[in-house]
Image (cartoon, rainbow, N blue to C red):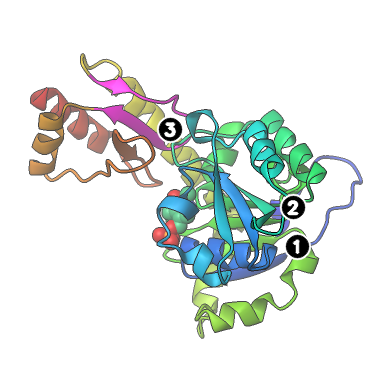
Amino acid sequence: MPTLTGGTSGPEIEPECEVFFVATGTAANALALATLCRSYESVICHEFAHIETDECGAPEFFSDGSKLLLGRGPKGKLSAESVNTIVGKRSDVHFPRPRAVSLTQPTELGTLYAEDELSAIHATAETHCLRIHMDGARFANAVATLGAKPAEITWKQGVDVLCLGGSKNGLGIGEAIVFFNRDLAAGFDYRCKQAGQLISKMRFVAAPWLGALETGAWLRNAQHANAAAAYLDARLRTIQGVEVMFPRQANTVFVRLPEAVQQGLRRRNWQFYTFIGVGGVRLMCSWRTTTARIDALVKDIQAEM
Ligand SMILES: *Cc1c(COP(=O)(O)O)cnc(C)c1O
């Protein structure tokens, strides 16, 4: 997968990676994390991390009980300080030993870890011998905004394994698990099979990835989604009484809307979640969101306000 490791200019040698495909992001995260930890070890993640709030305990299940330790940080981003605090708390045999850090890029609140924030986590992880997992279900959206080469925000920042999303970026189905640390991939094919993730017609999952990567569609789709969210964000900010909750950095816009307005929108058949992170209405834009659709939503919000 050359576009993933394709790094900076010059004769630098790129590491090879091992790639596996699974059906869902939940399977990708759970199986990857199970590989990073023994059952008595633990994973530090943000309290709003998808692995904690939206995967029905799959990481704990597939890792035979590795505990998730919940950290904090502003705007949905785990801070290096919080990681330090958790690791420093205990080192006795009664406590599940921290062995990995999990970062979501972009986060569940639609924000992005900047390169210096990744570096700070990387340094902390090195100090404490923690491996780094990245939940990149919407990783392409992060690349589209940051303008960084994928290498700069993954293995060069110490990421051992990246769960790279396809389903949310225009592919029919399938997520790629990319091991930059190839030693960790030993036996992973068995783990996939045991978990029912060895898809017999794997070519139908893998082939679209080739097309998406070789044509650049993976990045164009993400750029489109981000641009749509930027447009939505700008339109919402013009409506009196609508509060945009976080800086828009990828394809997500969170807004606070009066309860009656939410109900009115649902009656008009708009669908959205209100249980993510800190509440508020989460509006997602995708590779196929149109300006017309956004205009229609904005018009309905205005009518309900
Ligand atoms: C959607 C998503 C996933 C994976 O979800 P599945 O429904 O299991 O494919 C994982 N992490 C994040 C941050 C997501 O947004």
Q: Are marks 3 and 2 in contact (CB under 8 Å)?
A: no
Residue 105 lies in magenta, yes or no?
Answer: no
Q: Is residue 221 visible?
A: yes
Tag 2 secondary structure: helix
Marks 3 and 2, the one that precedes in the sequence: 2
Considering the image in quadrants, where does the C terminus appear? top left
Q: Are marks 2 and 1 in contact (CB under 8 Å)?
A: yes
Q: Is residue 112 above or below residue 125?
A: above
Q: Position of residue 274 (x, y in %)?
A: 27, 40
Crowding near pointer 3: few (<14 within 10 Å), some, many (20+)?
Answer: many
| Horizontal arrangement in the rendering, residue 236 relative to residue 144 (left or right) | left
Q: Are marks 3 and 1 in contact (CB under 8 Å)?
A: no
Q: CA distance from mark 2 to mark 1?
A: 8 Å
Q: Which residue is mark 1?
A: 17
Residue 227 bears which disc, if any? 3
Find the magenta span and give its range.
Answer: 242-256
Q: Is residue 166 above or below residue 76?
A: below
Crowding near pointer 2: few (<14 within 10 Å), some, many (20+)?
Answer: many
Q: Position of residue 301 (x, y in %)?
A: 16, 28
Q: Residue at x 49, y 38 (%)?
A: 223
Q: Position of residue 285 (x, y in %)?
A: 36, 41
* Dot 1 amino acid type: Cys
Which label lies toward us, 2 or 1?
1
